[in-house]
Image (cartoon, grey):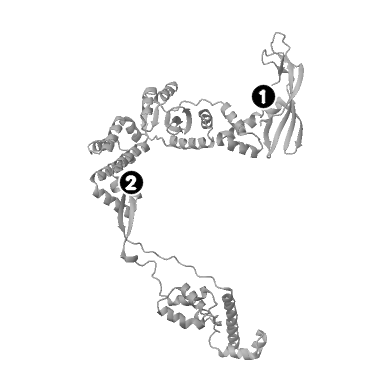
Amino acid sequence: MDGRLFTSLLVIHLIRWTGDEIVLDASGAAAAGVCPTCGTASGYVHDRYTRQPRDLPWRGRRVRLRLIVRRFRCLNDACRRRTFAERFDPVLRRYAHFTAEAEAALLHYGRTTGGEAGALIAVCSGLHASADTLLRLLRRSPTQPMSTPRVLGIDEFSLARRHRYATVLVDLETHRPVDVLNTHKAEPVAAWLKAHPGVQVLVRDRAGAFADAGRQGAPDAIQVADRFHIVQSASQALDELLRGRRRRIEHATIHAEPMPITAPAVPDRPPSKERLQSETARARRVQKWATVRQRHAAGEPISRIARELGMSRMTVRHLLRTPEPPPPIRMPPRPGGLSSPSLQPYVCYLQDRWQAGCTNFAQLTREIRALGYAGSGSLVSQALLPWRPPRPSRGSAPRHGRRRLRRYSVRWLCLRPPDQLATDEHAALDQVLAEDDELAKGYALLQQFRHVVAERTVAGLGCWLAEAEASGLAPFASLAKGLQDDRTAVEAGLRLPWSNGPVEGLVTRVKLVKRQGYGRAKLDLLRSRLIVAP
């Protein structure tokens, strides 16, 4: 809050802290009031009353003004107003429950996040306000008129899909929305263009309504057809050509050679606690062996070596007679597998059953349990697992020597850019095009048109239009006729750098704002959230 402006209108007498709220006792600073009807100054105080507006929070705590408002008596006998209250504009509006700075903060919350989310943010910041309050502030906030842009982008968006549409106008030089119209018809858009002269470039998609609106409302403006929508129209022409062939060639199937599968590297298991202890003990024994031999080679007697190293002379002599370091101590294996005492009486029976063809571990376990075996089934599986032959590796040839079959959507192959296709996808596409001459011709026209738009060659556009009209393909002939009728705007789209990309991005933002409204985002509220003066 501007402290100078605040103190020039109000005088703070006392600051009190009550719980989570800070209360500022204040009163008017002016010596007299001015009658809003006749303009007569008066210092005669008729009575007083209290207002308690909310101010900006301080460190997350609510701040409330306890403002003593004086009511003056008008001294002009000819004035129809007998009494009037002193005013605190622009710090505090008449009948306002928030100061101007607090209203500005709430308006910012509502404009950026909507009513419900803005109310949550306001409560967390210390400004307690409902979602309805934020929506009222949004609708009451004046929308400052925007200057007429030199380069105007235009596109429609749906308010209720297939029922109602609106139009958004964007300044393509600043990427800021200018206005939102409650229709997508040509006449209202043309009326807006007539009421806002000065548009020199009109960027649009290939909608005929916007083309007519530009010719009626801004006849001197250069109309530019968006390049993305032009290429999209060519893709739709090929898609229409594919639509009649989906029953025959909906999918393309090719034989793919099996790819070798490399088994991932399996990390070594960490050593067990017993193994670490064994290695540590062996390292100590090797160190003693090396120390004894080194000191004896230096001429020290056996008695001194034994005394200083804390070992007997017999141990020293034994280490000197050993030519190699001490080997690791081999722990005797624990009884398990076929050598397990619980399984040993049934080994002959298991061998006979295995030779007879029974290799099911669960079945063999049940049979020996009937003979008296009391051990676990996992012990039987662990003991008999080495009897099975090794499995074939994962990288071997597939069963029966068959090659894998891969299926691709023909529509996906034809509409995807060629540089984004893999080698086998190119092979599938070549196979489909080789079997259908008309589809191959349409695919070639689409790729040629994409190249023309990417290179922005106006001369190449004329050649392509002639080829499309002479191709005999109805979708491309219709596309060529439509581009020929709108050729001036299409050529301007190839020559000029402007596009409708910022407008499409704003339409995506409009969809987010609509969803944040929870069904309450009417056009006036939508306009107040979108159009904000810089």
Res. 411 mark = 2
Q: Position of residue 38 (x, y in %)?
A: 67, 12
113 w.r.t. 395: above or below: above
Q: Amino acid at mark 1?
A: Tyr
Crowd around label 1: few <14 · some 14–19 · many ≥20 (10 Å): few
- Give percent across and percent down for residue 135: 58, 31
The kind of residue tagged 2 is Arg
Which element carries disc 2, helix, strand or loop? Answer: helix
Residue drawn at point x = 70 percent, y = 25 percent? 9
Could you tell me which residue is drawn at 39 percent across and 64 percent down?
Answer: 261
Give residue 317's position: percent from left, percent from top: 60, 91
In the image, taking residue 267 as reference, residue 246 lies left or right, namely left
- Between disc 2 and disc 1, the foreground one is 2
Report the residue marked by disc 1. 95
Q: Is residue 102 left or right of residue 411?
A: right
Residue 323 has which mark?
A: none
- Residue 164: give x, y in percent of width and height: 44, 30
- Label 2, residues with CA under 10 Å away: few <14, some 14-19, many ≥20: some
As measured in the structure, the alpha-carbon distance from the residue carrying label 2 to the one carrying label 1 is 64 Å
Q: Is residue 348 above or below residue 143?
A: below
